[in-house]
Amino acid sequence: MTQIAPIPETLQAEAEQRTSQWLEALGTAYAGDMGQVARILCGSDYLYHWAKRQPKWLVEALAADLSCLSANILSIQQNLDLSWPEYDVKQFLRHQRHYWSMQIAVADILQQLPIRQICYLQSMLAEQLINCAQDWSYQQTCQQYGVPVSSEGEEQHLLVLAMGKLGGEELNFSSDVDLIFGYPEDGETRIGEGQRKSIENQMFFMRHGQKLISLLSDNTADGFVYRVDMRLRPYGQSGALVANFNALQDYYLEQGREWERFAMIKARVLQAHHHFREQLANIIRPFSFRRYIDFSVLESIRQLKQKITIELQRKDAQNNIKLGDGGIRELEFIVQSLQLISGGRHPQLQAKNWWQALEALVQQGLLKEEDASGLKSAYEFLRKLENSLQIHADKQTQDLPDSDDEQQRIALLLGATDWAAVETELAEHQQVVARFFKGLFHDPKEEHDHNDEVPVLKKLVQGQLDSERQADVLQQYSLSEQALKELQNFRQEFSERKIGLRGFARIEQLLPHLVIQASRQKNADKTISRCLEVLQGIGRRTAYFEMLAENIPVLEFLVRLVSRSSWLAQQLAIYPSLLDELLFPTNFGKQLTKDNLTNQLQQAMMRIEMNQTEEQLLALSRFKQSSQFKIAAGDLTRRFDISEVSQQLTDLAEVIMEYLLQLAWNEVTSKHGKPRQDAGELVTDFLVLGYGKLGGDELGYGSDLDLVFLYQGEPDAMTQISGEQGKPLELHQFYTRLAQRLVHYLGTRTQQGIMYEVDTRLRPSGRSGMLVSHIDAFDKYQMNEAWTWEHQALVRARPVAGDTSLRDQYLQLRNKVLSCDKREQLGQDVVTMRKKMRDNLDKTDTRLWDIKQGNGGLVDIEFLVQYWALKYSKSLLEQCSVDELPFNNVDWLQLLAGENLLEKSTRDCMMENYRLLRDIANSRALQNQPALLAKEELTEQRQAIVEVWQSTFQHSDVE
């Protein structure tokens, strides 16, 4: 678009009106080109708003010497007076942002500078304003707390890592700025006269960072400077706001993930001493770029590529020029993935800027010149279109407009004749990008041979075989007439739904392969029924039909899983998006550690704004469902034993709870302040205890969470409000609100269902008691008022989220309670409670035996362990030098036998049968069946448990 088209007739009237209003605000005649003024004011609501508020700004923008624009922007930092009060600094930053943004936008609209230069100027402006905020914030924090120094007395400064487009100096007009904060060394501040006591460097830089963010992102009468996103830092939003170099190095060395290697390609240190800048760069560089050609990352790249494709299908993002097919994200992925593979061997590829990296790829022979030319043209068109979309209203959007009016305005900003011309050129560029992206890192495993069985099976499903041939084929594939009828009904139903020719063609392609795969399972009929249930759940989302039809190994894996679990089939039918997980078979069978889950959750939440609570809850629900699905798949393929399954399900619940607790903390503290002045960003003086299966690391697929909440501090003390907003609360009320919010989040129903059912009845005094307990009150209750069954429950009561200092207090308290010798009738109390439970909960009848509550079942083993734990805890702590008592039943058995407090034969009997019964109960759950067995089964194992019970409680009245 070299020649700028005139303003269309439909916008002429508004262009004239806006121009007239600007001239009126200017108060004098304008001798320049009024056509340019009209184009700018009509095309951009944002520029029109500021031109009316500051009419001379537009005059200066139109008269600007563009050869001096870079130098003028670089002088911003020199014009900041560090003695200004905060109000003046905020106004200065905002006015500077809007003033120079107007000059850059005008140059863009009038096509006076190429888009590469425009993006560079936008980045330069952001960097200058961040530097200003950093300088003022540092001085103010030093005045308050002293100067941070290392152990050798060297002055310390905050280092700001610019990530994403700011790091690559290719920022778009209305972009967030992604930042990470670091500082060189731990130490404390050196204070001067009249200053309070020194504080640790960590606290200093946290306060400094918070102030810096506030200067940039607070919304005032002049708007904000930039939205600041800190979630790319180690551990995401749950991590510390700032970290020293040692902590950063440890994190990236031990826990950095593949997507972070991508992100760190663009990491660029802003203003800093050369020595510190190099130190930080030397931590980051080897993390992203290995010294050899890194083909090990190919599978990760393929997985990231597939995720982009899946997200595109799921979100229907074709109207989004960043996320859509052939969009900006695909262009960034193409270049960054090639950088990641070869950047360690070719330092030229370590460029942070997209254009520079593309040129380096051509120079190194890793990209053909003609391919690079097409990608570059597409990127520049898309970036210019993105800039125009954002200049229009200063909003961070990449969505194409729907209304004719907005389409005309964007075409006007681009200098195009009309919107149709924009769409035509856009489609051409997207096609080039999509074609290249699709062929990048092609996976040979996606290929599959043509199957000669398919034509016959297609005729079978379509009802085109004669009765004799049909009977032969059904026998060959172990199918009944009923299963065939279900297949034909499904096909007929979807043809009647008119899902479109393409969608129906995929179903026709899919069903024969479904028959082939189902026939290889133990029960083909049952497998067909379950698979059709899943396909019914897909509904009109034809992308999933396409995925299964085109990826026979994926279909094969799906059929295998569904044949083994009706529960999993039901989950897939309710939540079809779980099918996305099947594209990554390497993810199945890997045991997920808590760190793995934390990292995956951080990645899943990366691009959701902190204030978008509903979106966060939905993403968390998706994360829970997908993680649970992967665990179940590994379980069904016998890659995990029951202990590994339960541990992963427990860790998953904890990771989600920790995230939600922090979310609840952020919400409650924003409204009511923090419990004390020195409280940081993380949850303080509050602890969540997991009882029952959660505490014992034994969660199942549908388990509830039994939770109890503790806090410390003066109950009547008031929370500390910063600023004028918010209503302070007494601490007890504050922590009650926090617990209520956490329970609410855990139980909120989203499109992906609820996360967990929560039961809080195990708290002191049960339903009649307070939701949260002070740690001292909890101590007093446990020692003086609790029943024996409550001490039994404490055997598995484990801290699962919250303040680590309070965790240590609780563990000491638990040791004291479990080892107390006030329980004079321990055996009788345990037996009485067991009889009461059996009378109320045992589902055993004349034919079936209850695995959990029946005589010789799981609960008998649990009660025995609890009895032994309460009986021997004092000996374990005082005589056996045990520091921390376990929570898990198996760990208790191992400890008791190891200290010769329990016969090893008894331990082995209990452990073997406990695992066996849990495994059977878990398998029943995966089949959507109750935990009941025929009475004649497992008689020997049940009798062994009963004998241990009877020998332990010789005067028991429980049969």
Image (tube, grey):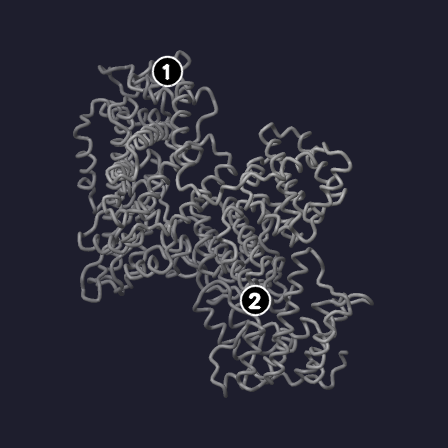
Q: Is residue 628 left or right of residue 940?
A: left
Residue 643, disc: 2
Rendered location of residue 645, percent (x, y): 56, 62
Dot 1 corresponds to which residue? 417
Regarding residue 93, the answer to whether it shows in the image is: no
Packing grade of label 2 (10 A; few <14, some 14-19, many >=20) is some
Q: Position of residue 208 (x, y in %)?
A: 29, 53
| Comparing labels 1 and 2, the label whose residue is closer to the camera | 2
Instruction: Quadrant for the C terminus, please.
Output: bottom right
| Residue 560 or residue 394, whichever sits in front | 560
Image quarter hosting the N terminus: top left
Please report the residue visible at 70 percent of the width from the left and 72 percent of the height from the top. 857
> Helix, strand or loop at disc 1?
loop
Q: Could you say whether the residue bearing mark 2 is in a helix, strand or loop? A: helix
Figure quadrant of residue 789: bottom right
Q: What residue lies at 34% left-to-right and 22% top-to-bottom? A: 414
